[in-house]
Image (cartoon, helix red, strand yellow):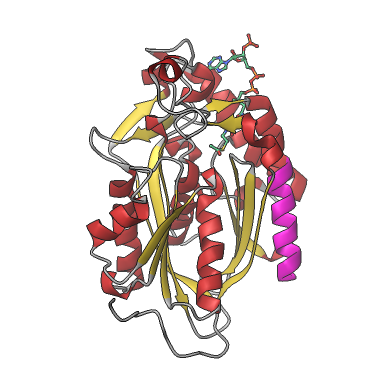
């Protein structure tokens, strides 16, 4: 067995920081006008109900791992980290390339990150923030130094393209971050995560697992596609995200006035507006890109974080709140001092 590169000496006052971000979306743009051609809908309906104008769709043969690796390369480049320095790859997805190997292992192969331990986590749209929390624990507990966290999904592969209730909402993409100890006061201050399995059926893919394996009958019934109770999801999204945001801020000893930027899950503009109202925060503080990408599941908050980071929406020392919800239900929030 090779010698573990993860066993490192203890370092005092470790602050786990995001030292680089990256993202990737496929080239192909699917506009609302394009969708009008194959289901009964309109740009007006989609825009007024969701705020989404267009989304990106992966090319033939472009899998979750390919998008994830591209986002990861950009994050590693910004962080100044080489593939050999990555100790762990944690990838949040509900659209893995294969059930096993994990998509994180596929990404390891593409990157040549030969020293990394790799695994996926399933927390739907909350996958990226759940992964940040796990990474923070690993680094704080001295298990390793450098963790590559990725949120990546190819929801176009599990959407029922004949169901107008869902097919207008989603897109494909990936976002990544490199986490590492950094001296000083900046870093991930607090992370909160929670789940409520009682609401599992409001947003789920019933088939494809051992409960309802892939059979001709199950595929004919579209059980291998995403099913959603839109109104209930909408309601739970607002309740869970505002609770997660409040708890994370309390844990951090901060108020919304201290925040420079809020990066929410990018599902629906009306959900973000309702969240802003509940939190009593001006909408302008929220970074929004769902008009261009739709809901990219685990990738959404990671792509938005990368965009906000690269466009200078916040500076070193500023407080940023990330808040998400997803199927499961799962929800999470992180307060970061950049
Ligand atoms: N175009 C036109 N009409 C549509 C469309 C469409 N694309 N989709 C649904 N409709 C129709 C329905 O058939 C229904 O018609 P009916 O009343 O004649 O039956 C009507 O519009 C639905 O109306 P509402 O339910 O009032 O629509 P609502 O305002 O709730 O908006 C929406 C629906 C956009 C789905 C909203 O409920 C929502 O955003 N929910 C949250 C969805 C979400 O965020 N999902 C992702 C979760 S994150 C994750 O983990 C993946």
Give the residue at x 38% y 61%. 118
Tell me if I can see residue 274 in this picture: no
The stretch in magenta equals: 239-255
Tell me if I can see residue 26 in this picture: yes
Please state if 148 lies on the left or on the right of 2 as rendered.
right
Residue 81, image x, y percentages: 31, 73
Give the residue at x 45% y 19%. 218
Residue 222, image x, y percentages: 46, 19
Q: Quadrant of the N terminus?
A: bottom left
Please state if 261 lies on the left or on the right of 247 as rendered.
left
Give the residue at x 48% y 17%. 163
Placement of 160 over or under 263, stated as above or below: above
Residue 158, image x, y percentages: 42, 30
Placement of 110 over or under 152, stated as above or below: below
Q: Nearer the viewer, residue 312 or 136?
A: 136
Q: Nearer the viewer, residue 246 or 119?
A: 119
Placement of 312 over or under 284, stated as above or below: below
Residue 283, image x, y percentages: 64, 46
**Which of the 4 quarters of the picture holds residue 198?**
top right
């Amino acid at each position: 067995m090779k010698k573990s590169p993860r066993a490192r000496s203890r370092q005092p006052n470790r602050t786990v920081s995001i030292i680089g971000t990256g993202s990737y979306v496929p080239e192909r743009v699917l506009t609302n006008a394009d969708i009008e051609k194959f289901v009964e809908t309109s740009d007006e309906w989609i825009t007024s109900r969701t705020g989404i104008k267009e989304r990106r769709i992966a090319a033939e043969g472009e899998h979750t791992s390919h998008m994830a690796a591209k986002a990861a390369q950009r994050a590693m480049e910004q962080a100044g980290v080489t593939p050999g320095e990555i100790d762990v790859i944690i990838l949040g997805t509900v659209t893995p390339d294969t059930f096993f190997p994990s998509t994180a292992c596929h990404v390891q192969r593409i990157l040549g990150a030969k020293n990394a331990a790799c695994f996926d986590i399933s927390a739907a749209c909350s996958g990226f923030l759940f992964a940040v929390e796990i990474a923070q624990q690993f680094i704080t507990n001295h298990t390793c130094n450098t963790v590559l966290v990725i949120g990546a999904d190819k929801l176009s592969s599990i959407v029922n393209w004949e169901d107008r209730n869902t097919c207008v909402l989603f897109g494909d993409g990936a976002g990544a971050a490199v986490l590492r100890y950094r001296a000083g006061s900046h870093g991930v201050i607090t992370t909160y995560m929670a789940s409520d399995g009682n609401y599992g059926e409001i947003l789920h893919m019933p088939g494809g697992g051992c409960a309802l394996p892939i059979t001709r009958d199950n595929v004919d019934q579209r059980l291998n596609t995403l099913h959603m109770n839109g109104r209930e999801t909408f309601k739970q999204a607002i309740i869970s995200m505002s609770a997660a945001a409040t708890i994370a801020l309390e844990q951090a000893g901060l108020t919304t006035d201290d925040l420079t930027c809020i990066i929410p899950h990018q599902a629906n503009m009306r959900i973000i507006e309702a969240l802003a109202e509940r939190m009593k925060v001006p909408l302008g503080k929220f970074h929004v890109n769902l008009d261009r990408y739709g809901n990219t599941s685990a990738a959404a908050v990671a792509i938005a974080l990368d965009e906000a980071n690269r466009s200078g929406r916040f500076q070193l020392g500023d407080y940023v709140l990330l808040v998400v919800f997803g199927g499961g239900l799962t929800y999470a929030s992180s307060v970061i001092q950049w």
